Amino acid sequence: MEIKEITNKNVWEDFCLNVKEKTFTHSYNWGLFNEKMGDKIWRMGVYDKENLLAIFLIIKVVAKRGSYLLVPMGPIIKEGENEKEVIKITLFKLKTLAKTEKIDFIRLAPILLKNKENEKIFSDLKFEEAPMHVHPELTWELDISIPEEELLQNMRKTTRYLIKQGLKNPDLVVEKSTNENDLDYFDEVYKITAKRHNFTPFSMKYLKNELASFKDDNQIIILNGKYQGEVIASAMVIFWSGIAFYHQGASSQKYPKIPASYLIQWEAIKEGKARGCHTYNFWGIARDEDLNQKNHPWAGLTLFKKGYSGYAKEYIKTQDFKISFKYYLIKLFETLRKLKRNL
C-alpha cells in the first residue's frame, strides 16, 4: 500500500459513490468548505498499485487550546479491504505530517460501525477515546427508496398527523432556495434555537461558506417554513452521493401548534427522493440511556427525528493520537467543557 495525494475531483467523488459507509464530511466540496473557512487541507488516497482502496480528508485545525489534524468521519474504505491496514498506513501519513505542521495531536472520527473488532483496531494502534465528538457518533437514518404513502404509513402516528395538518394549512408554506439572502431567515430562528437550547450557533460566515461550497453542484438547499408570511422554522439539507443529510435546523417556537418543522422534513424527504437519493440521514441523536438524564439537550430533537421511522447507526467513538504532552491539558479542558454542556 502507498499513499498519494488526490487532486482530481472526479476520482474522489466516483470512489465515494461506490462506497456504502460515508457522509458529506468526506465529500470533495466539504474540503472546499474548510478551505473557505481558512483551514489547510489535504485529500489523500490509499492505493495498492493503481487500485484505490480508501480515501481520507485531512483538516489542520488551529485552536486556542491547541492544534491538531482531523480526519472527519473517515477514512472511507472500500468494502472488503483490510480496515486495520488502511488505518495503520493512514496513521503513518498523519504522524509524518504532524512533524512538519507542528501539531499537538491527531483526531480521527471513524466511520466504522461500533463493535469490539473495530474498537480493537484503534486500541492496538495506541489511539485513545477523544473526550468529545466532532461529528455524530449515533445517527438516525431512513430508507426513502420506498413510495411516499409507505413512508407516511411507517411514521409515528403523531408525526404523520402533524405533516397532514401542515399540508392542509393554507397559511403554512415551505419555500426552497439556494439564495444566500435567505440565510438571514435561517440565522434569525437559528439564534433563537441556540438561546433556547443553550448552545453556540455556527457563525453566518460558516453558514454562507457551507451554502457556497455545495451550491454550484446543486447539492444543497435552504427550506424556510413560513406561517402567514413569517419564517418560523428553517433547515439546510445537503444531497450528496445518494444520501440526503439534514445538517442544520432551527425553529422559533413562536407558534408551537403550527407544524412547520414537520412539514420541512417531509418536503426535504420528498426532495431527496426526487433527486434519486436512497437514504435520508437525520444526523445526530442521543442514546436511549442518555435520555434518562434530566433535561438532556437532545431529548426533544431525538424524539422528533425518530418520529419519521428509520433506524439507528452507531459508529465507534472519536479517536485521538497524542503527539505532544500538551494533549493532556487539551483533553482536560475538553472534558470539563463537555461536562459543563451536559453532553
Image: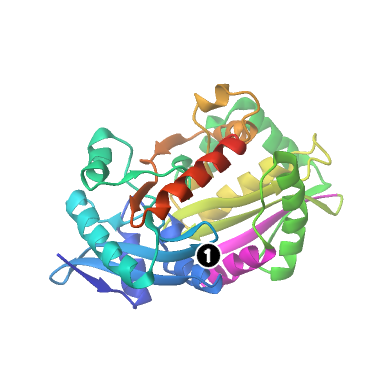
Left or right: 98 as drawn, with respect to 152 = left
Residue 76 point in image, percent of width and height: 31, 56
Magenta highlight on residue 214: yes
Q: Residues within 10 Å of mark 1 (few under 14, many from 20)?
A: some
Residue 242 picture quarter: bottom left
Rendered residue at 35%/70% (across/down): 43
How is the protein colored in the picture?
rainbow
Left or right: 124 as drawn, with respect to 339 = left
User: Which image quarter holds the N terminus?
Assistant: bottom left
- Is residue 216 visible to us here? no
User: Which image quarter holds the C terminus?
Assistant: top right
Q: Amino acid at mark 1?
A: Gln
Count of labels shown? 1
Specify start and end residues of the magenta stretch as a single range: 204-227
Magenta highlight on residue 270: no
Given residues 142 and 105, the one toward you in this image is 105
Given residues 189 and 282, the one toward you in this image is 189
Question: Is residue 318 positioned above or below 156 on the image?
Answer: below
Given residues 193 and 311, the one toward you in this image is 193
Rendered residue at 59%/28% (across/down): 156
Residue 153 picture quarter: top right
Residue most extreme to the bottom: 7
Residue corresponding to mark 1: 219
Rendered residue at 69%/48% (across/down): 250
Question: Is residue 264 positioned above or below 274 on the image?
Answer: above
Kind of element beneath mark 1? loop
Residue 93 point in image, percent of width and height: 26, 65
Rendered residue at 47%/50% (across/down): 330
Left or right: 189 as drawn, with respect to 47 = right
